[in-house]
Amino acid sequence: MKVLLVDDHALFLEGLKNLLVANDFEVIGTARSSLDALSKVELLRPDLILMDIQMPGCNGIETTRMIKEKYPEIKIVMLTVFQDDANLFEAIRAGASGYLLKGMEKEKFLELLAGIADGESPLSPGLAARVLAEFARRENERVRDEAVSQEMTTVLTPRQIAILQGVAQGLTYKEVADAMGLSEAAIKYHMGEITGRLQLKNRSQAVAYAMEMGLLKEGKSGKER
């Protein structure tokens, strides 16, 4: 497995290279910036990249995203000093195959890296539980959103859902009317129907309800009927 190392700290980069070479990893190159990394990827076509997150200019996560868009087959493992959940999940969304802390024991580090060849996704101890918890949270949110969608479509028509979504996004009645090809009077009538069906008192409560139910997310508005 051909490995490219990317880190802006020369001392760490040299130490990591020596560690990997001493343990039979084929290190084919190093890079100290995003631009350097992108150039080396084009030239060397590595199988695996060990990528520092915090780099000047374009960070490792954005660099990972750019590489994965062009070379989805390349595996990228993020390296960082900090246990930052935001960076962890952003790196996974960018396409990273793993996420390892620089301060971990070298034996564990090498063990986790070796698993990449077998299709494993290396995560520092303790981070796997966070990833599973986040996936569980997103699954619960998806189930909740589906339940909300079913509830909404039984109470409101797709046109009314679209109107409520537009109002919740801050559009005026006239702007909603123009966007939907309706009259402003029709929008006001539908808003009256919406507040009545949802047992709300006014537009402000309707907007609050729409936000609570996630109507500002993509895919929640329906087609007119």
Image (cartoon, rainbow, N blue to C red):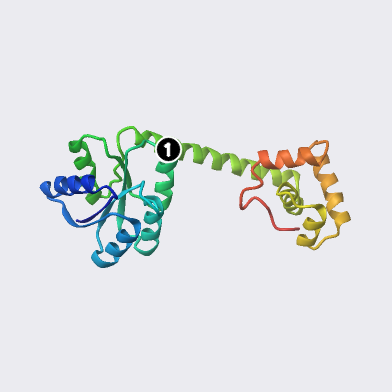
Q: Nearer the viewer, residue 161 or 102?
A: 102
Q: Residue at x 64, y 50 (%)?
A: 220
Quarter assignment of residue 146: top right
Q: Residue at x 62, y 41 (%)?
A: 147
Amino acid, disc 1? Asp
Quarter of the image where the N terminus is located: bottom left
Q: Secondary structure at mark 1?
A: helix
Please provide percent x and percent y for residue 166.
Answer: 73, 52
Residue that extends furthest to the bottom in the rendered view of this protein: 43
Q: Nearer the viewer, residue 124 or 214?
A: 124
Query: Badge 1 is on which residue?
Result: 85
Picture layout, residue 199 above or below residue 91: above
Quarter of the image where the C terminus is located: bottom right
Q: Residues within 10 Å of mark 1 (few under 14, many from 20)?
A: few
Please provide percent x and percent y for residue 179.
Answer: 76, 61
Residue that extends furthest to the right in the rendered view of this protein: 185
Picture layout, residue 151 above or below residue 175: above
